[in-house]
Image (tube, coloured by chain):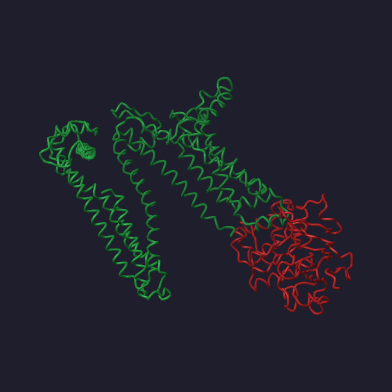
Amino acid sequence: MMKDNVDAKVGVNAMDVKFTAKDVQVYYGDNHAIKDVSVDILDKTVTAFIGPSGCGKSTFLRCLNRMNDTIPIARVEGDIRLDGEDINAPQVDPVQLRAKVGMVFQKPNPFPKSIYDNIAYGPRIHGLAKNKADLDEIVEKSLRRGAIWDEVKDRLDAPGTGLSGGQQQRLCIARAVATEPEVLLMDEPCSALDPIATAQVEELIDELRQDYSVVIVTHSMQQAARVSQKTAFFHLGNLVEYDDTTNIFTNPQDTRTESYITGRIG
Amino acid sequence: MPIIWLVLIVAAIAGAGYVAGRARAMRSVEGDHRKLHSLPSYYGWNVALKAIVPAFILAVAWLLIQPLVVSSSVSGMLPEGAIPENSSRGLIMAEVRRAADGLDMAVETGSISPEDARSDAAEAAEISQVLKDSGAVVTSELTEPILRAAQRYRALNATGHLLMTGLVILLSVIGALWGIRESRGDFRARNTVENGLRSLLIGAASIAILTTLGIVLSLVFNTIEFFRLYPAADFFFGTEWAPSFSGRGGSSELGVLPLLWGTFYVSIVALAVAVPIGLFAAIYLSEYASKRVRSVAKPLLEVLAGIPTIVYGLFALLTVGPLLLEIFGKDGLGWMQAGTAVMTAGLVMGIMLIPFVSSLSDDIINAVPQAMRDGSYGLGATQSETIRQVVLPAALPGIVGAILLAASRAIGETMIVVLGAGAAARLSLNPFEAMTTVTAKIVSQLTGDADFASPEALVAFALGMTLFVITLGLNVLALFIVRKYREQYE
């Protein structure tokens, strides 16, 4: 009989592990959305979550920074550790956790503020800047990291909502980077973008890998193959297979994974 | 013949037309309704609409115009000598109308025969006695010219009505026949009915707009009349409000400034109460309250908006006034002379405005996309930081709009002020003193027995106009703000 879940520990050096999840369950009301998911997410690596719609990949992503706390009917069980520390422990403040684990959403959601204020939002909340000059520097650095500095440096006072879709999404990535997170979660960051903007964001993700652990949920298998080093395949709330991206796409171990990447399910 | 019969006859024509039009359309395609351009009922409606609409328009126009034509015709008949020294043509015409109504009534009760009421031989004194006996309101003895005019008035009106009835029925029949003639298989009845319905809706919308226009025009003309009698500069810049009711005129001081000041002072106190409480209530309801609490609390809060303002006025007069007097009056801090004061009216008006601010703001805050909140939480912001720095700025245009709407409500409020703020027009900074507002003074200027042509009464229109311009300005500003910033987060 085939195992529903893999034990995703193969060939991992414990030093590089950023997130460790063990037997995670998520319920939305009566709906059991995530079943017994265990996974190790590595530092300085892009990990892609793929799978058909409704398979639970976004839900699991939202467990990692406790965004599910904002949904009243969601209930999370199991053990998730960031650098060995249980993130669901009572003494952990979800607000602090989210500063360490940044998130970029499916639809670009710049605040109705100026470009400058969008970036400065996180640093101001967390008191990262000592003075105005410091803040200016953080904003410039973040916009450069978001690969959008050259496009907006002359109009930092313009509203962030006036940018194009691709620019808005890079602004949101820059905004997430500005709080100096250790992990960056991206929930289908390119699904609302055109191919050129997508290419720009993918390039950016690859650069971000040097400093962060990046977890990206994507519908596009080509995108997973292009940007990630590790890939996890979710199906019906189970983590079916987790391995190096090249292995998943060339030599999948599970028949469900093979069916999905060849287009037979999903 | 009463109007109701006319309506029933036209309705019957339309009903018969509906059936006939439908049947003719069906016959034209030998009963196979798939060959019709439109569903069979559309052919019926086409006929019914053509029977009703032109006839209806004619009837309304006729009813509006006939009194004008009859009046001017009868008025032209009155000789110059029939108008007494101290009277005017308008007053005599009112007398004529009263006499005509009296004759109608007398004929109806049978105390005079229709022939006698019409006859040229009727004696004025005799008729006048008959009218008095039958209980009609006749102020003075009927004179010969007035009786003749009244008789003519009745005759013209009777002919007019008869003519109208005939023409309306004729037009209705013509319309129905025209519609029936059109009812053939290839006629686009569906599109015709669609156009008809559209015109109906346009008509409804224009009536609303035209009524507004009419109100504004009546304000404007009376205001102009007022400024002819009283200098505009004294009205706008006078700091004294002291109307005299002696009827001599000229001795009145009609400066609007004390009233405007009272209006603004009371409104500011009211908004100072309503805006924070309403806004915080809205934030709690939309962001913190659970679904269950919200579903109970929101309707309860909205009940406040359903309380008639006179009840708020009683609350101000009987509860809040004495309560404030206890604290700030002679036995307390000594700032307050009587229960009626700016503070009393302002506080109660503020309570009245809470649901306006909270209900609108709640809807607006709810309309801020969840993606904004997610973005902020995702950066590690707390709930109150998110509300203060992301949700409220995004909702601000709408909230400002809500506040401005509440402000125009406050400025136009009357009952609470009449009962709660007193009637003294004065310029003072002390919120515990009695003051009065524009609306309260409009009431008091028009409820006396002042002559409507005197500046003391006409000033009410100038006050109304001033108020209208101010609230209109506020509403336009609110709309402008909402529209300009509405799409910011979309």
Split into 4 quadrants, where in the image is the C terminus of chain A? Answer: bottom right
Residue A134 in view in this figure: no
Q: Is residue A70 left or right of residue B193?
A: right
Which color is chain A depicted in? red
Q: Quadrant of the N terminus of chain A?
A: bottom right
Hue used for the chain lettered B: green
Q: Position of residue B193 (x, y in %)?
A: 38, 65
| Residue B135 visible at all | yes
B278 vs B183, nearest the viewer: B183
Q: Locate residue A76, reporting x and y percent.
A: 78, 57
How many numbered circles does the render carry?
Answer: 0
Instruction: State the residue at coordinates (61%, 58%).
Output: A157
Which of the 4 quarters of the picture holds residue A28? bottom right
Q: Which sits in the foreground, B27 or A200? A: B27
Horizontally, is B120 left or right of B240 in the view? left
Identified at 37% across, 55% down, the residue is B206
Rendered view: B40 above or below A72: below
Residue A136 image position (x, y, % from top left)? 69, 56
Residue positioned most to the top:
B331
